[in-house]
Image (spheres, rainbow, N blue to C red):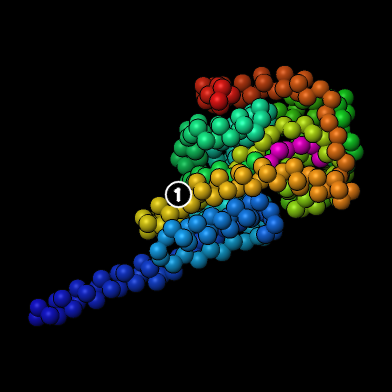
Amino acid sequence: SFARIIGAATAVSVIAITAASADEITLRGASLFDEEHAYTKTLRQLEQLIGDKYDGDVVFDLRLNGELGDESDFVTFLQQGVAIDYAIMAPSNMATFAPSIPLMDMPFLFRDLEHWDTALASGVMAPLEAELLAKADIRVIGYAGGGVRNLASAEPIGNIDELTGHKMRVMGAPIQAQIFSAIQAAPSAIAYNEVYNAIQTGVIAGFENEAASIQNLKFYEVAPNITLTKHAITVRPIVVAEKTFKKLPEALQAAILEAGLEAGAFGRNLESTQDGEKMQEMIDAGQVQVQEFAGREKLLELVVPVQDAYAAELGASDLLEAIRSK
Ligand code: MAV
């Protein structure tokens, strides 16, 4: 009968609606750090914003303290769309899948915080994001970062002579090793979660990192000498596994994209503001000794040809110019 058909149709749509909304969606995130670190706070902000912007139910399951590995593990999980749906990542830890993405965070790319800010706001990184999406199935939804990376070592490194042959850990992207070789160090790519032990046992003499992470993971215990090379201002995309993203309801996708931009702005502001404070806290606590690097301009001269060659090899010389000239 008519009534039954209507009834049947209604029943179907009720099921459909329940399936979409009550079929709870769980998204799993990953952070290397505890709740105190800017990355974790930024991911919490992202969750909050998505929740505010989306009417349906989403559950966020953020795993902290490197429970799901370090970023070289995250990238594999994100690419496969299993185990991790969202994270904050160093581009140089995503090199295996998208060789051009580490151009974003190569050392000595930005002159200062203002240049970094302008470049990120300009959309100039769009071709790199497109490559990451196409090759790695990883979507950039915003940019966190804003920490300044310096050398941290067991013994003080104050000038190019002391830097020469200095055994240090760098991130996995080849361009990272090339740049630190160019400034005369002896870099090796070691997993982030092995760095502390590698310094402690003397396998390497140091590494390079930003204050927030040196503090959060207590790297100062083994590498208390900070040299202010200020060689990088971090660019840290907030990323989502595209294989997961594609399956989400449209309204949730839209909420994620908006939230990503806003959480990124929150994270950049937080981390860049906290950077000096975190360093000062470690100085005040007697955890680090900080010194300038004598002759930083010389380092710049050494790295520019390496940056140029890397960009040329990727066919990205124009892009590099565009970033430099922001
Ligand atoms: C710092 O903890 C962060 O910049 C993080 O994103 C990087 O993966 C890490 O350093 C590293 O050097 O690998």
Image position, residue 304 (x, y; %) = 67, 21
- Give, as a single range, the part of the protein colored magenta: 147-152
Residue 161 location in percent, x, y? Answer: 88, 24
- Badge 1, how many Cα within 10 Å: few under 14, some, many 20+? some
Q: Quadrant of residue 174?
A: top right
Residue visible at 9% across and 78% down? 2
Type of secondary structure dominating the magenta stretch: strand
Residue 131 shown left or right of residue 217 in the figure: left
Rendered-image quadrant of the C terminus: top right
In this orientation, does residue 265 appear? Answer: yes
Name the quarter where the N terminus is drawn: bottom left
Instruction: Compare residues 95 and 153 and report the one nearer the observer.
Output: 153
Q: Is residue 28 magenta?
A: no
Residue 151 in magenta?
A: yes
Which residue ends up furthest to the left in the rendered image? 1
Q: Which residue is mark 1?
A: 257
Q: Nearer the viewer, residue 98 or 207?
A: 207
User: Left or right: 6 with respect to 61?
Assistant: left
The number of discs equals 1
Q: Can you give x and y, in whole percent of width and height, for residue 182 in the image?
A: 74, 24
The answer to whether mark 1 is within 8 Å of ligand 1 is no
Would you say 312 lies left or right of 156 here?
A: left
Residue type at the position of mark 1? Leu
The residue located at (55%, 31%) in the rendering is: 119
Q: On the rendered structure, is 16 left or right of 181?
A: left
Q: Nearer the viewer, residue 130 or 210?
A: 210
Relative image position of residue 287 (x, y in whole percent): 87, 48
